[in-house]
Image (cartoon, coloured by chain):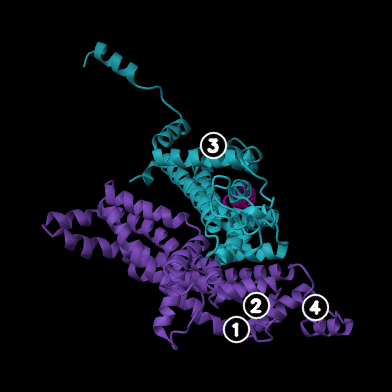
Chain colours: A cyan, B purple
Amino acid sequence: MTAAAIEPAMQKQPAEQSPARQALRRLVKRRSAMLGLAVVLAFVALAVFANLVAPYDPTEADWGALRGAPSIEHPFGGDELGRDVLSRVIFGARASLSAGVISVLLALLIGIPVGLLSGYAGGWLDGVIMRFTDAMLAIPFLILAIALAAFLGPSLTNAMIAIGISAAPIFIRLTRAQVQSVKTEDYVEAARAVGNPPWRIAIRHILPNIWPALMVQATLTIASAIIAEASLSFLGLGQQPPAPSWGSMLNAAKDFLTQAPWMAIYPGLSIFVVVLSFNLLGDGLRDALDPRHRG
Amino acid sequence: MTRFLFRRLAILLPTLVFVSIIIFGLQQLLPGDPAIAMAGEERDPVAIAQIREKYHLNDPLYRRYLLWIGGVLRGDLGESIRIQQPVGQLLVEKLPVTVELALLSMLIALGIGLPTGMISALYNGRWPDYVANVIGLWGLSTPNFWLGIMLILLFSVQLGWLPASGYISPLEDLWGNLEAMIMPAFVLGNAISAVLMRHTRSAMLQVLSSDYIRTARAKGLRERMVIGKHALRNAAIPVITLGALEFGQLLSGAVLTEQIFSIPGFGKLIVDAVFNRDYAVVQGVVLCTATAYIVLNLLADIAYFLVNPRLRA
């Protein structure tokens, strides 16, 4: 090949992109992940602008709509107190999404520092932290969340704390495993050789490199946290009446299945759609950030 | 093997100690005074003092932990303050119900998860793969309790085919038992089938691209033989051991499923105990499930070690 032929070929080559940009390009190409993202954003918008979007006050009782079937005035029907189910589903999105995101943020806040410490320090400290983490992981997630929510008292805030603490061991384990796999890399050795203190190496050099794996896990855990919040509210340990939440709406609905099945259909469908969307987004993120997972 | 077992036991024992500390610590921090709750509405100070004395509620925390763990090791898990019955006896009564539910659920999960995972891997990138993936996503995204309510709505309220709730012992009426358990077992198995499907798919994909499968095909073996004898056997090892690890998820799901279908198992027991501040029962159920999970984990590890010659080498 002549130099003249090589030059245009080189010009056609795209400029070298950063790994993050490449991952973003791969993510955008995945239609299912983009659909998941669009649905999540739509629900976030609904939750934020619930006051403007909801046709009625979610706690306002209308005796005319008492267990009323879906109609033009009440597209999702009325509940056992005549409240508009659509408005309650829209306001319920606030409880579910905030519980999902805040509890995972809490789990990250606990999990990342403890995991960094465990993975970087090693030795007996790592052993103690890991046995404690194993012990927490041995108690089934929802059972631990129920016990914690019961101890803290029934409320949405306490449900979030219970879910966050119960989910923290997942992030401790993941962070530790990631730290162990990168701490012998050349760039960490180099940072150590120039005299960086351990905390600086952990935060400035290790954390940015393990962030993608944590982000994928966080997205997938939000889906589990939304189900956990709905489960706690369903049992009466989360959002308290009359404030709406999808789980507590289902709890009330189970006593009126023959008279008003719509009370159960729409809140459950909302949980399903949101959780599915987070799962699609999480799967897409995982494939985009780690192409080995494809296929 | 002995070294492997010792190593696993060395990890298992401190984990069990931490489990007991977490469970004991949690329960002691529950809101409300159990002595006042047990004394009834009259709140007689003498009765409260007697209850405190009987249940060592005046002792320091570490002493109560030592008393509790000492009792646990002797098989004494305390007494339910609500039912006035030993917790151990309650657990033994409820255990068969939850074990039956768990076994039926696992059967359903394996029945759905293994074939769909295999089909998905064999038809990678084609329409059966997409259908299997949709089934997997459905299983992962459907809340157990909602699926339970929807099944009751369809099969009990609309069609009248199955009972909406209740439990009949298989020793009394086997058919009646299966009728009552099929919906809750499907609800629980549904979520686990999705996890098994995904793992079967990835294990099969890995096995199908390995050299010995290429060799089996190259020497002219029929595809059915290649898949059935060579691929499936090897892909099934990690999947079956994973089944044991899914036990925790099964128990989490059982809490809500038993609540919806009014099945008198572990799940219903712990929820009722939480609402009645029945500390001993909550402790007993959580300790029992966590120990079972740890032991199953160990058994899964040993099974994996035994069937995988590379680990034994």
Task: Compute the Cα span from label 2 to label 4.
Answer: 16 Å
Residue A208 vertical position relative to residue B86 in the rendered view, above or below: above
Q: Residue furthest front?
A: A64
Considering only order in the chain, which callout, 4 or 2, is on the residue closer to the N terminus?
4
Which residue is labeled 2 in the image? Answer: B281
The image's mark for residue B90 is 1
- Mark 1–mark 3 distance (CA, rounded to whole Å): 60 Å
Q: Nearer the viewer, mark 1 or mark 3?
A: 1
Residue range in magenta is: A98-120
Q: Does the magenta segment cover residue A109?
A: yes
- Residue B85: x and y in percent read 66, 87
Residue drawn at the location 47% of the way across and 54% of the way down: B141
**Residue designated by label 3:** A190
Cα gap from disc 2 to disc 1, whole angstroms: 8 Å
Frontmost residue, B3 versus A269: A269
Give the alpha-carbon distance from disc 3 to disc 2, as whole Å: 55 Å
Q: Are marks 2 and 4 in contact (CB under 8 Å)?
A: no
Q: Amino acid at mark 4?
A: Ala
Q: Residue at x 70, y 53 (%)?
A: A157
